[in-house]
Image (cartoon, grey):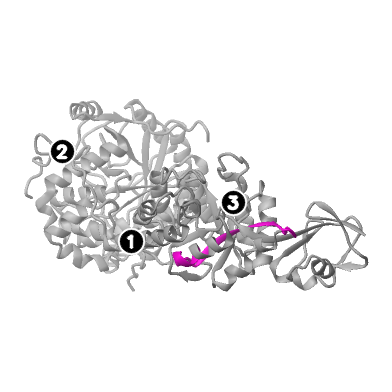
Amino acid sequence: MAGVIPSYLDPTPWIPAARGASPADVRRALDSSQPGEADLAALLSTCAADCLEEMAGRARALTRRHFGQTLSLYIPLYLSDYCSGGCVYCGFAADRKQARHRLKPEEMIAELDAIKAMGFDEILLLTGERTSPEDLDYLNRAVQFAAQRFAAVTIEAFPMRAEEYRGLVQSGAMGVTVYQETYEPIQYEAMHRWGLKRDYANRIETPARALEGGMRTVGLGALLGLSDPLFDVISLFRHALYLRRRFWQSGVSISFPRVCSQEGGYHPPFPVNDRTLAQIIFAFRICMPDVPLVLSTREAPAFRDGMAGLGVNKMSIASRTTVGGYLTPVKSPDGQFHVNDDRDVATFCALLKGKGLEPVFKNWDKVYR
Amino acid sequence: MTIILNGTLYELGDPAMIGHLLTSLDIVPERVAVMVNDRIVPKEERNSTVLNEGDRVEVLIFMGGG
Amino acid sequence: MNVVQKLILGGREFESRLIMGTGKFASTEIMIDAIQASGTQLVTVALRRFNRERPSDDLLSPLVKLGITLIPNTSGARTAAEAVRAAMLGRELSGSSFVKVEIHPNPHHLMPDPIETYEASRELAKAGFVVLPYMSADPVLARRLEDAGCAAVMPLGSAIGTGNGLSTADMIKLIIADSGIPVIVDAGLRSPSEAASAMEMGCSAVLVNSAIAAAGHPADMAAAFATAVKAGLAARRAGIMSRSECAVATSPLTSFLTGA
């Protein structure tokens, strides 16, 4: 039986406004000094799509004001692609037939050292859904190794209890990324064919549990394309508001992963094109000016270059989405998703500098911990 | 018997309950709060609380304040 | 928040968003006239030793007659322990469990002590008081006080009696953005337009004392403040248009986007 979206997230009251916004509504939203859900809805409308250039200008001004003329860089490391899950859209789903790998401790260390040599100081460690009780010990170990090398260690893994997150904090983790994938409960159930991830309510509460466990930041996101983007983006906004109010000492960041049709892969029912994704990001920046907005290497170079500084203030670069892959970089089959931007760090940094953006590898020091 | 009332010496016949003190001051009991030796004495205990020699008594009212 | 909330304190809804202080008035009669002209439902009072020579100083009965809810303050306390005792006395005297925690050890600038205020507020909230702490406009302290169980927070607009208006406006806006309880600006408001501004900003109420008591005609000033507070609240409910900010790019920022 499908879950039910909690009332503090439900975007339904604002969807008519998003569908039926007039130019006056859009203007009011752009002029609002304290934008809320109604303003976000107006800025997501087809009417607002005619004001994209103005929205871009606002997004850029607000990003500059809150984050300066910088772009933060991080890198993901897939520790393992073993996964018990059945997500329809994912390259690692349990019924996909490729060989699975898990980094052994010495391999982990070698990969971490290789990544450190690339200049990064923030790393995102990823695994799939929980397959065995040892998975948590494995993850703690990985965090400890990473924390010895990187100023900021974040995790994107299976949902856990608050005490388990607390353990990871003690191991040195600072944040957790967990995407709801889609906030629409019926589609959520359809997308998650079996296993623990089917539990919609449990997934939605995961960021709160991570913060309860002492994580400093959570990364939220919806996989755009699975459901009506209006539904997911407004829910995402409300989720961020809820967590910021409840955990006022913690940070929230927002990612905008987009499911793209892949050869032999999943075809999303609500594909989001570049203009729409840009509009979503601009609208989010305008309505929530002070949270980091993140793009990954899922997106193509031209889009990333254009969006850098226009709302987006954080990106990964030189990523591998196969397990490991940094020690001996080779062209290999796609991992969790196809990497569209495969430029190296130096090239990307030069591009950013050319745009007047300073690449930033470190925002934290652990001195007082 | 001498007590210290609002910081100054005050003569009271003994035995004296707080109620007697308030009467001698011509105070309407509902208008004041009373402390004896740093303890608040609720209204309902005033007629059963005996004052002793040297007790520090504070009788307080509301005045204007921001 | 975009939604304009009701003012609910101690489980009761209050229509009037103007709270008055009762200090510094030339006489009790003038104070009573001003209170009536203001339409206020909540006033603060202070505790003082009964003075046999001046029995009419007592405010309790005139205010009770007006049907006004009293908020005893802890003015004079310099520590949390003293403030807690003052609150207990105030509750004993008024029968109301409202208390304004006001601890200002420096008698010149009268700025509130954040540490003693936090400790007193936490203890009093646990003891069932409806705690309204007077504080510097510190957004983090505001959340700490909310977490400790306060019914509202009362950040100062500027130092008591200075009439320097909403000098802490930026901080108050941060407090309002994060707060789950009413934010009531207290201290420093000099004119009704400042009270209207505070309401437009998102405050749930304002507390005014000096500006009314020291006015040429306190009752008329109280009425003016009441009008201003109503106007500010109505404006917020109506949805205020604001200055827009837009960076105008010299070349289009979105030309990199394709149609598909």
Residue A110 lies in quadrant: top left
- The magenta region covers C35-53
Three-letter code for the amino acid on which mark 3 is drawn: Glu
Percent coordinates x, y for residue A273 in the rendering: 13, 51
Q: Identify the chain of the residue marked 1, using the numbered disc in the image.
A: C
User: Residues under labels 2 and 1: Cα distance?
Assistant: 45 Å
Say which of A1 and A258 sits in front. A258
Residue A146's quadrant in the figure? top left
In the drawing, does residue A267 fall left or right of residue C16? Answer: left
Numbered disc 2: what chain?
Answer: A
Q: 10 Å neighbourhood of mark 3: few (<14), some, or many (≥20)?
A: many
The residue at 55%/55% (across/down) is C25
Neighbours of disc 1 within 10 Å: few (<14), some (14-19), many (20+): some
Picture disc at residue B48 = none
The spot of residue A265 in percent (x, y) is 18, 54
Q: Which residue carries the number 2 mark?
A: A306
Check disc 1 and report its element: helix, strand or loop. Answer: helix
Q: Callout 2: few (<14), some (14-19), or many (20+) C-alpha neighbours within 10 Å?
A: some
Label 3 secondary element: loop
For residue C166, above or below residue C2: above
Q: What residue is pinned by disc 3?
A: C102
Q: Are marks 1 and 3 in contact (CB under 8 Å)?
A: no
Pick the residue in front: A136 or C192: C192
Is C51 magenta? The answer is yes
Residue drawn 47% across the image and 49% down it: A136
Q: Is residue B22 left or right of residue C85?
A: right
* Amino acid under disc 1: Ala
Chain under disc 3: C
Q: Is residue A267 visible?
A: no
In this rendering, would C250 be left or right of C189? left
Q: Inspect this view and state whether residue A288 appears.
A: yes
Residue topped by disc 1:
C231
